[in-house]
Amino acid sequence: MEPILKGRGLVKRYGRVTALDRCDFDLMPGEILAVIGDNGAGKSSLIKAVSGAVIPDEGTVTLEGKDVRFTTPIEARAAGIETVYQTLAMSPALSIADNMFMGREIRKPGWRGKWLRQLDRPMMEKLARDKLTELGLMTIQNINQAVETLSGGQRQGVAVARAAAFGSKVIILDEPTAALGVKESRKVLELIQDVKSRGIPIILISHNMPHVFEVADRIHVHRLGKRLCVIDPKDYTMSDAVAFMTGAKDAPEAA
Amino acid sequence: MPSSDNYESVVGKANAEIASFGGREKTLIDRFHHALHTTPALVPLIVLVSAIIVFGLALGSRFFSPFALTLILQQVQIVGIVAAAQSLVILTKGIDLSVGAIAVISSVVMGQFAFRYGLPPGLAVICGLVVGTAIGAVNGWLVAQMKLPPFIVTLGMWQIVLAANFLYSKNETIRSQEIAEQAPLLQIMGAKFEVGGAVFTLGVVFLVLLVAVLAFVLKHTAWGRHVYAVGDDPEAAELAGVNVKQTLISVYALAGLICAFAGWALIGRIGSVSPTSGQLLNIESITAVVIGGISLFGGRGSILGTFFGALIVGVFTLGLRLAGADAQWTFLLIGVLIIAAVAVDQWIRKVAA
């Protein structure tokens, strides 16, 4: 099977620091691929390189067999790659609905949309509410409340809902459960399964081994700027995975 | 999953109880705080209305008449228009110190193009508007593309534009009578009409329309939302899919265009084209914006607040003058208002969940 998203020989240097060292990367259609690695291993650089947030110095990225070269996250989004960043990328003073539709607002039909470029607020609010209900975030009472009035978990939920609503080919989640409580983490994991069942592959970056082992189909172990190995969570234990990513144990031969 | 369903429903009940309990405890302050948070123009509106009431009671019909109240509008029209431009820039966490200089050079271009080169007045006005927009766009390009701090860019641009203004105009004033005879279009923003004792000028009408249009655009268009998002957190906006650079450049260019309109209104107000006019517009526009409750930290506030802020300054100025107070009292009170407005801004920012 051909990978839907493929990286080959990716190199990214920041001054004298090499964040990505001829790194390869494969995401198969319909799978959940977890990316794990120690701090500073280059996980974020890898994800940014395939999602357009940084431009790799060398190497190629291939989406559905076609070479792509994203220079901004907007281009990656237009190609169907949706990312939830660790920082969530939301504007605190704006409402939930405003944030969910930031950069792809819906205009009113007819002359008010065409000539006055007026936004279709009722429509955007309705869609936003539907998405949040799907995610079980109905503790949010008012879709027009500012994002800064939400708890950390609720904000994360809104960001994930945004990605799930718009991602068509690949969804990338950077530490989606890091800021969440038990119940909200469960919701996000359920949502990840839900998105997968719709046939959209997911890249999950996480430090939380139980979460990774619960949902991932394959685990990409990142170490020193490149792919150390790809393991099947059914064949290895969590302590094996931690041993590989920290270098305590040599990687298995066959990826 | 029956157990987790039960668990959630229990949490739901508990939340509701806590919410209603808290609501009963401190309804008034909470609601007020919430209202201020969602409607930032409320504070300047309250101050404006109370100022009008206080001066109305103290001065009676001398102040509280259609003539006096519309006189305030005429006196704040230029500052109001420039402050509207300033609001846009400050909403993006920037500041534009060159607004006054852009307004003046635009008016000079309108006058000189009509008189020195003999262009038709309509064309001269368009040239002035283009020059204002172009200067604004250069500001925007330097801020967005070259990543220079807005304060520095516009501080430099202020000096450059002001000097260019004096060099180009050779420090000459075009007299009011000449304009009235040969190019009355330049003074049209000063054209007066009366509605039952209230006197309006086209410049005042323009100011009100401008505020209405900008309020709509900022609230109900994607571009307006992007302006707030860029001011709030530019990196988040970029990652969320906003073209930050384009938004910034368009904001500064639009600010330049609005300032050029202010320059046109300036000719209407003073009658002549003078390169030395409008020197205080920078500070006065920032004052109006701050009193109007727009946060200098970006992303918060509304254009209506700026309008009220400009009117507050106008009400204080006229009210105290009619009361026969020393003009310094006006400045003193406005200084107090500025500091109070920023204190209120900080209070509003403290979010009560």
Image: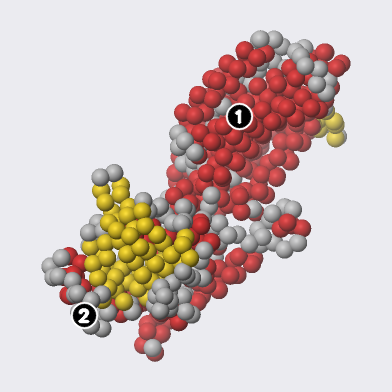
- In the picture of the structure, the residue carrying the numbered disc 1 is B135
Left or right placement of residue B311 versus residue A40 in this view: right
The kind of residue on which mark 2 rests is Tyr
Residue B99 position by quadrant: top right
The local crowd at label 1, few if under 14, some if 14 to 19, many if 20 or more residues have their Cα within 10 Å, is many
Q: Nearer the viewer, residue A115 or B352?
A: A115
* Residue drawn at x 65%, y 22% as measured from the top left: B105
Q: Label 2, secondary structure: give it.
A: loop
- In the picture of the structure, the residue carrying the numbered disc 2 is A236
Q: Quadrant of the C terminus of chain A?
A: bottom left
Per the model, the C-alpha gap separating discs 1 and 2 is 64 Å
* Residue drawn at x 47%, y 60% as measured from the top left: A68
Q: Nearer the viewer, residue B224 or A15?
A: A15
The local crowd at label 2, few if under 14, some if 14 to 19, many if 20 or more residues have their Cα within 10 Å, is few
In percent of width and height, residue A91 lies at 48, 54
| Number of numbered discs | 2
Q: Label 1, secondary structure: give it.
A: helix
Question: What chain does badge 1 belong to?
Answer: B
Q: Is residue B121 above or below residue A56?
A: above
Left or right placement of residue B6 versus residue B141 in this view: left
